[in-house]
Amino acid sequence: MPRRKVMTGVLLAAGSLAGSVLLRRRAARKRERVDLYADDGSMHSFGEGTAEADRLLPIAHELLAS
Amino acid sequence: MLGAMDAAQAIADLKEISPQVRDVVVIDPEGNPAGSSLREEPAAARLADGARRLLATADELRPGVAQLEAATIVGSVFVVRDGARLIAATTTPEPTVGLVFYDLKTCLRSIDEPAQKKPTGPRAPATDKAEDATA
């Protein structure tokens, strides 16, 4: 019986952890960002609030609104 | 205009295979829309202008940008450069980024380039082989 309780606890903890990871990932994806891909294959990502994104995101908003 | 009929067909194919794509515009080397999914010309011109501004600003920040995605909550804007030509698209939120880039590049490359002018001048005389051999 105690062994079963331990298993239930472990499963609940694992489920909570997986749920929180998924929620964090989903929240991160919902953040606005700009990804720049260079000719050499490198990529730079700028999240909202950075100087780079603050210059580029308004143009994107303008295009998506029209 | 650069192969307008071909651009229209390529854009129609793109829209068919990529339901995430909303509006598309192909921009010729002069910066003008060469084809678009938008029916109204001013709307296509606005998208083309915005895409060029987006790429120009990105180039100021990080020179040598070949393609970009600006992701917002309401959707994304993609701009892809292939030589002197560009293709820009708006998509639904959270698109499959790799697929959209692939589809845009395929679309742009499937559009005919303007015919290259053939040289009309006389052919240069053949060089003396003996002269080459001694070099």
Image: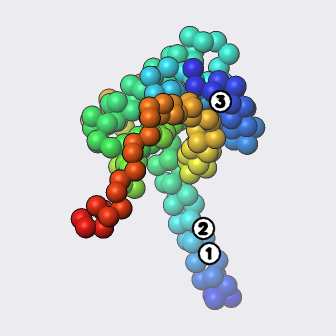
Query: Label 2, on which residue?
Result: A15
Q: Which quarter of the image is occupied by the N terminus of chain B?
A: top right
B100 or A6: nearer the viewer: B100
Counting from the top left corner in percent of width and height, residue B102 is at: 59, 48
Query: Label 1, on which residue?
Result: A11
| Amino acid type at mark 1 | Leu
Q: Which quarter of the image is occupied by the C terminus of chain B?
A: bottom left
Marks 2/3 same chain: no
| Amino acid type at mark 3 | Ala
| Position of B39 relative to B18 (above/below) | above
Q: Secondary structure at mark 3?
A: helix
Residue found at x 60% / y 83%: A6
Q: Secondary structure at mark 1?
A: helix
Counting from the top left corner in percent of width and height, residue A52 is at: 30, 36
Question: What scheme was used to colour the molecule?
Answer: rainbow
| Position of B19 relative to A66 (above/below) | below
| Amino acid type at mark 2 | Gly
Of labels 3 and 1, the one closer to you? 3
Q: Quadrant of residue B54?
A: top left
Q: Quadrant of residue B19?
A: top right
Circle 2 marks a residue in which chain? A
Q: Is residue B105 left or right of residue B58?
A: right
Counting from the top left corner in percent of width and height, residue A47 is at: 37, 42
Please report contact status of discs 1 and 2: CB closer than 8 Å, yes or no.
Answer: yes
Please report contact status of discs 3 and 1: CB closer than 8 Å, yes or no.
Answer: no
Marks 1/2 same chain: yes
